[in-house]
Image (cartoon, coloured by chain):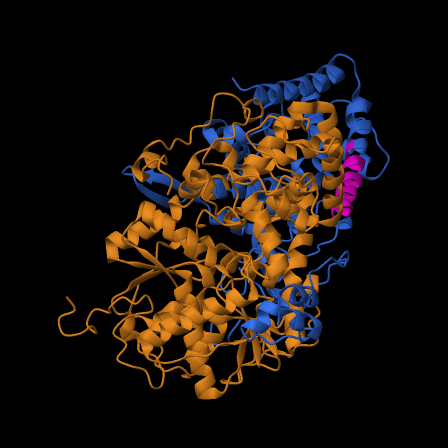
Chain colours: A orange, B blue
Amino acid sequence: MPDDLFKSDELLSKLDPTPPQTGWMDTPVQIRKGMYCYASNPKSVEYVGLPNARAWNPLDDDWKLPENWEEIIFEGFRERLDRFRSFKVFMDICVRCGACADKCHSFIGTGDPKNMPVLRAELLRSVYRKDFTTAGKILGKLAGSRKLTLDVLKEWWYYFFQCTECRRCSVFCPFGIDTAEITMMARELFNLLGLNIDWIATPVANCYRTGNHLGIQPHAFKDMLDFFVDDIEDITGVHVEPSFNKKGADILFITPSSDIFADPGTYTTMGYLILFHFLKEQYGFDITWSTYASEGGNFGSFTSHETMKRLNSKMYAEAQRLGVKWILGGECGHMWRVIHQYMDTMNGPADFLAEPVSPITGTKFENAKATKVVHITEFTADLIKQGKLDLNPGRNDHLRVTYHDSCNTSRGMGLLDEPRYIIKNTCKNFYEMPRNTIREQTFCCGSGSGLNAGENMELRMAGSLPRANAVKYVHEKHDVNMLACICAIDRAALSVAMEYWVPDVDVTGVHELVGNALNLSGQNERTTDLRSEPIPGLEGDDGE
Amino acid sequence: MNVNYIFSLLSVIVLFLLAYVGVEAAGFQILFGVIIPYLAIITFIAGFIYRVLNWARSPVPFRIPSTCGQQKSLSWIKPARIDNPSTKMGVVIRMILEVLFFRSLFRNTKCQLKEGDKLSYEWEKWLWLGAIAFHWSFLTVVIRHFRFFIDPVPSCLQLLEKVDGFLQVGLPGVLFSGIVLLAAVIFLFLRRVFIPQVRYVSLASDFFPLFLIIGVAISGILMRHFTKVDVIGVKELTMGLVTFRPKIPSDVGSAFYVHLFFVSVLMAYFPFSKLLHLGGIFMSPTRNLANNSRRIRHINPWNYPVEVHTYEQYEDEFREKMVEVGLPVEKEIAPTISEEKE
């Protein structure tokens, strides 16, 4: 947490959603520290061959744009209107009813009117009207149109990197206008000019080269998992043996690499390892990890559809090379937006894979018949329902859990009850947050879509306000001390957000709860949980 | 004072004067009673079709519904068949609910900070109610007007008018739809002016149609209840229009021409403005697609091959390190290299 960041109560008290006196077109953008992410490292941009790699600074007047940047934007805009009906329709049909305004965590947390989804889109629409509609050309400002200038471009850049593509506004929009879609187009346009942010560009380059965002090379990836193997042995007394790049395994498992790297995601990874060990011991189910396709997340999707496709291609390529039957996907948000809504279309058909069936329960995953990727909570919920797991939820008794639906899995998929079923079967104390803040109405962690950097902490904490506020509610009402989620960015982002807003609540993945509860044959007393913290009631005689 | 609504109000006043003076002083009955309405309806139909076809020309490369409920996955988990449809039938019902009952707007909440640090989200029904009242009464009014274009008037229209006039006040009876329309459109205007955020995002093109529709409603009500227009004469004119034998009856009064002119402007304006959300809602990919993209492959017509980093390239870069920790490789390390190492 940066030292100069306001305390949480200060941030709350200076919140003022009153729009400024000047109209939005006459209120110039001010790129403010704490609210933006650093510009991309030119090496990263160059590595993946994206345009206009150079060092630049958003605070400088000169952004070192290509000479014909207006033309590039105009052509890029036109091309995207021709390619995406969503974009064209969303540019045309907004009636500015304002229903979306206070649905956005960015607006609620910052009070900045340009963070209202409607106005964020108008930033782009105003130029669209000027360039692509007759009325906009003739009537100018009266028709809500304006010319694209460098200041307008900077305004776009500032605000389209304050949208986390969470799609909450699209749930409430009477026409289903999805700001995520508009933000994706805006970021594609930025990419054409080399206006990427480093928190996205460098993970993209890493992922392209090493297979994962963090740039973990194959040997290090294995080492890191081996480290968890040791931890698990210390905690449970059981030695688990993950396999890597194994040809002929039953299935390939892919999950976000940040869960290999950073707490508390690492405990979720330990949960996976325990589950997979159990399945292998009990049922001979053979799961392999890949170092080449070692990333579930896809920061390419925050760059352009093309970059998304380039990174996503590894999943099918690796599944084909290894000859597995189908793919199991770990807990991640936007990874699942990509898998569910884009992957098969972009990189399919996956006719070299089999229609997914759980060999343990015989359940056919009909809903994943074509894409052939099953979500781990679908998989585990089925195992639990069919009584295939030996669970002792008692080891989670000390946790009072609430559940945060990730934006992408809820609004881009509808995966709502599977994780809840798992939670309810692995721990006793489960409390829902208020209805308007969960399921399809869930609030973003505030750091999605590649905005999980350190330098934009004020933006992130402001954006996490609605989510944290709902957690605080259940913390105060039900003494909730654990926030469960199924997204790696959530695990990283919400941990910081909790520290800032509700310090007594920790963050966990759903499969950490599974790992805690699952009994392994030959295990020891298991007096600590996966965090190596003593479990109250199970620790030694006095437990201090 | 807000330049956007002043400008829109002035535009509508100018339109009024154009029609009023044009008919009263200049005697342009043929222009306002025949030529402009014909042009307006042609613009409306041609413009509407053009715009919708223009949208349709752009493909839907990805299946991107906003899923607003539980997906259909495991057999024992109850899916939200309508809010997260997995079948065509589900989509049709979802669309019906969206188009006819504004399902999504019905969810509307109002976010408020209470006691300084508690966010609350209350159900905000007024926008939904205002919108529903506006659109349904507008539709009723439009349908009601078909009696001017059909002769004899079908019994269903007579029945509609009877129901609409259930208040049984005044003669000719006050029609409920007209009152609701006027009230709703004024409500929509007021919320645009008084809710700071909505005012901030509003453009002239948001106020103009509201004023225009207020003009349509007021001129209509004025004609029916105050200037007591010659209905026989009006029908003569409107029947002339639909049978392509236009004629101008002698004495229908300028209120009628103002009304007709407002409607003509509204129709001509419609396809080139946000009012086309009427067509757009049917085309919205976040609503009109089933959430079945993992079950049935969706085709992107412009999908093109991209440059990827292959496994071979990856292994070539990291082979030694992989071999060192015992990760399987496709190609063993070439002997020359290993000899050198030794």
Indicate yes or no whether the magenta region holds residue B51: yes
Q: Where's residue A182, x and y in %?
A: 62, 44
> Nearest the camera: A177 or B209?
A177
The segment highlighted magenta reads B40-55
Q: Quadrant of the C terminus of chain A?
A: bottom left
- A18 vs B304: above or below: above
Residue A71 in view (yes/no): yes
- Total marks drawn? 0
> Nearest the camera: B199 or A449?
A449
Q: Where's residue A89, x and y in %?
A: 68, 45
A349 with respect to A245 (left or right): right
Q: Please identify the quarter of the rendering in which residue A513 is found.
A: bottom left
Q: Where's residue B74, x and y in %?
A: 51, 74
- A134 vs A327: above or below: above
Residue at the location (46% across, 69% down)?
A225
Indicate yes or no whether the magenta region holds residue A62: no
Q: Where's residue A224, x and y in %?
A: 46, 66
- A414 vs B162: above or below: below
Q: Quadrant of the N terminus of chain A?
A: top left
Residue at the location (75% across, 58% down)?
B303
- B80 vs A152: above or below: below
Residue at the location (35% across, 54% down)?
A434
A31 with respect to A530 (left or right): right
> Nearest the camera: B336 or A189?
B336
Q: Please identify the quarter of the rendering in which residue B221 is found.
A: top right
Q: Main secondary structure of the magenta part?
A: helix
